[in-house]
Amino acid sequence: MTRRLLTWAESAVLPVVVTVLVLFLAAPLVVLVATAFTETRYLAFPPHGFTLTWFEGVLTDPTWRAAAWNSLIIAAMSVGVAAVVGAPAAIVLARRGVRAASSLTLLIMVPIMVPSIMYVLGLMLGYNELDVTVPTWGIVLALAVLTTPYLVRTLMAALEQLDPALEEAALSLGASRLRIWVEILLPNVAKSFFSGLSLAFILAFDELVVPLFLAGPDVPTLPVRIYSSVAYNVDPSVAAVSSLLVLVSALVAVLSARDNLRKPVTRKDGTPDGGA
Amino acid sequence: MAELELVGLSKRYGRDLVLDDVSLSVQEGELVTVLGQSGSGKTTMLRSIAGFVTPSGGDILVHGRSVLNAPINQRGIGIVFQNYALFPHLTVRQNVGYGLRVRRLPRHEIRERVDRELERVLLSAYADRKPAQLSGGQQQRVAVARALVLRPRIVLFDEPFSNLDAMLRESLRRELRDLQKRLRFTAMFVTHDQREAMALADRVAVMRGGRLVQMGAPTDVYERPAHRAIAELLGRANLLDCQTAAGEDGRALLRWHGHTLRTDDDLGAAGDGACVLLRPEHVAVRPGAPDAPAPNQLGGVLSSVEYHGPSRLAVISEPGGGTLLADLRSGPADPYLAPGDPVTASWPSAAVRVIDA
């Protein structure tokens, strides 16, 4: 009975979920991508005609290219910082019997709970006070703080899933602690670590508020450049850039999700076999 | 010389004495199972021998040498873990060779020894598979090979079957027993499953409350439990609190709820009362009330019958308020017994075992 009720609920809910996803997520993207191909000088949907001019313009325009480069460098650097800080943190926090591990984990999660605008305002005041004049590093560190929680969470979850006996087995075979980490534990969480990195990269790459407030026009990242062109002169270049941005994010997401989506091939049935 | 010897081994966690003065020895080629419920200290004992736990007192000797201060990998001990703990990202060959690689043995020697070990456990054809691509039995053999390739004095098994279903356990158990007999390695196997403990063992060590309470061949421990708690730990048991009385022929008698029990055991030191173990499978039941009172027989009413297929477990209530369990082997033409029927239960005097309360 419960089972039937569940299936019924599933079959009723699924179309609703799909519809909502399509309407609120996919539809705006479709509009955006479509307008990037319009022949008009203004944003038009449905697009009038078909042209790749806007893409060509964006890809050859030095300011757009500089913005893309900025975004790439800043995202990569902040993910690097997040990895250097987050990976050891996750390794320590995932160990059983670490005192105050849960409160420390909560502390690391704070950046995703605090509205980023508040965090950034605080940072602005702080940077002003400290007279930090290298805006790039300011942005990189701020983004690292914001993305580290995601990295720590995915890595911790993966480490906690590992059988604690793996470590003891390696110990009993004579491996040192360092060896166990490098040869046994980390290879088994590499995929999760990579998807955590990708997630952090996308978040850093797409982030608007942090670079906008901390650097403004000094270091225009792609989202900042898009934001200012929307504010000052709207033409289909914005749509073209945004389409490319969506494409890049989607690619990274697919790459990182590819391994996680595939079901692990574990045989638990253990049918008696005839030996070799 | 014993391959493994524990001398007064103790472990204290704060105020809790989880391992209390345990002494035992395991001979070469022997498979000893350690049976106990959770909290009996069996896991602490195993982890002390392995080196994951530092004992508070006593000594651990492997082949006559104390290993208390030896690092985990230099104790001459191999371990097969719960769920086997095979390295999922490594192939069978790499798993088995891991300990040798850590020891920096020359490549060709590693290859040789791994190949020979895989041959011994009949897994040569699976050398390049990952653990996830193997059946439960094959995984078990990889785990055993990974331990044996380092030529340990003794292999410890930490409840390797505890998360598996009953059928699979049974087949893995048989496979492990065959493997151990064929390769003749010395082993200690920790479990909370009494059937498993008895089926695998040359000798069973029964642990309770941190102490080793009895050690012996499975039949000894089952037939002659040293204590009523052990009798209950190992299978179903009727534990009857009897009074002793002098019989007409000079032999001592036991009285239970007005029924007379005769035993082949010596009652010399029993005093006024004695605890009697009567295994349910030694009790015969026939329909109808007894014709005349006789020793080792009682009349009662069947209060329930549980059908198990090969056997039926009958609960008999006798008029004095006592209950008796009888495990009846199923036959092709069993008399129909229903709850409420009057029945007669009887048993041979050899089945009446006087044990320590």
Image (cartoon, helix red, strand yellow):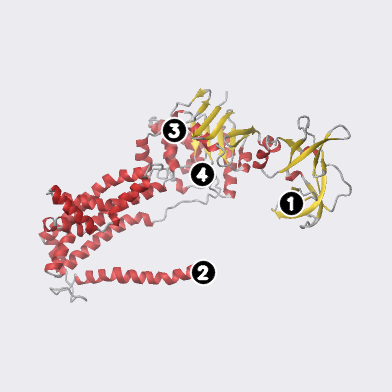
Which of discs 3 and 1 lies nearer the camera? The answer is 1
Q: Nearer the viewer, residue A200 or B74?
A: A200
Residues at badges 4 and 2 in contact (C-beta under 8 Å)?
no
Tags 4 and 2 both on a single chain: no
Location of residue A212 in the rendering, given as x and y in whole percent from the top left corner = 16, 59
Give whichever of A275, A37 is nearer the camera: A37
**Residue under label 4:** B138
Q: Name the residue under label 1.
A: B315
Residue A33 screen position, x and y as percent: 22, 69
Label 2 belongs to which residue?
A4
In the displayed structure, B101 sits above or below A135; it is above
Judging depth in this view, the residue of A143 and B5 nearest the camera is A143
Q: Position of residue A88 (x, y in %)?
A: 31, 43
Marker disc for residue A189: none
Residue B353 in percent (x, y) is at: 75, 37
Nearer the N terminus, badge 4 or badge 3?
3
